[in-house]
Structure formats: C-alpha cells, structure tokens
Amino acid sequence: MLLPMTEPDGLDRAAKLSARIADAEKRLTEMRGQRDDLIREFRAAGMSIPKIAAAAGVSESTVKAVLR
C-alpha cells in the first residue's frame, strides 16, 4: 500500500513515472519495428505466414498486416 504523500512528492513521482512510460513506449516501438523487419525478411525468404506467426508469437493476421 502506498503511503500518503505531499503534493510536491506526488507530482515528482508522477513526472518520473510518465518519463519511464515514455521511454518504454519508445523502446517498444523500436522493438516492434525490428520484429516487423524480420517478418518481412522471413516472408521474402519464402517462409509461410503460419510459420512466421508461430515463430514471432503473433497471430497470422498480424503477420499479414505487417506484410501489407
């Protein structure tokens, strides 16, 4: 359970959490881009959509969306 905090402490904590979230979102976007590049490479090499989906841990529809 969180202890009550003063307003400046709470605002500082909120700002730090927001910065961490922004950093995580940036990293997630970068990782998705890398995954999508690999999906395109695998497909160009002739791998089937179901096999790519299983390897990447995503649905076949996600693979198809990346390939559009």
Image (tube, helix red, strand yellow):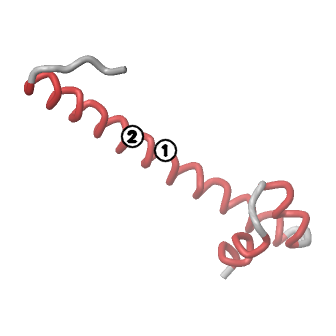
Residue 15, image quadrant: top left
Determine which residue is flagged by label 2. 23
| In this rendering, position of residue 50 left or right of residue 16 | right
Residue 58: x and y in percent read 74, 61
Q: Is mark 2 on a helix, strand or loop?
A: helix
- Alpha carbon separation for disc pair 1 and 2: 6 Å
Q: Nearer the viewer, residue 3 or 67?
A: 3
Number of other residues with Cα within 10 Å of mark 1, as a class: few under 14, some 14 to 19, many 20 or more: few
For badge 2, the amino acid type reads Asp
| In this rendering, position of residue 36 left or right of residue 47 | left
Q: Which of 42 and 9 is in front in this view?
A: 9
Q: Do the residues labelled 1 and 2 touch (CB within 8 Å)?
A: yes
Determine which residue is flagged by label 1. 27
| In this rendering, position of residue 36 left or right of residue 43 | left
Mark seen at residue 43:
none
Q: Which residue is drawn at 85% across and 72% down?
A: 49
Q: Is mark 1 on a helix, strand or loop?
A: helix
Residue 2: x and y in percent read 31, 21
- Location of the C terminus (image quadrant): bottom right
For badge 1, the amino acid type reads Arg
Residue 14, image quadrant: top left
Q: In this view, does 5 lie above or below 19?
A: above
Q: In this view, does 45 lie above or below 23?
A: below
Number of other residues with Cα within 10 Å of mark 2, as a class: few under 14, some 14 to 19, many 20 or more: few
Residue 12: x and y in percent read 17, 27
Figure disc tally: 2
Q: Residue at x 85, y 54 (%)?
A: 55
- Location of the N terminus (image quadrant): top left
Q: Nearer the viewer, residue 28 or 39?
A: 28
Q: Residue at x 58, y 58 (%)?
A: 33
Q: Which residue is drawn at 84% across and 63% down?
A: 52
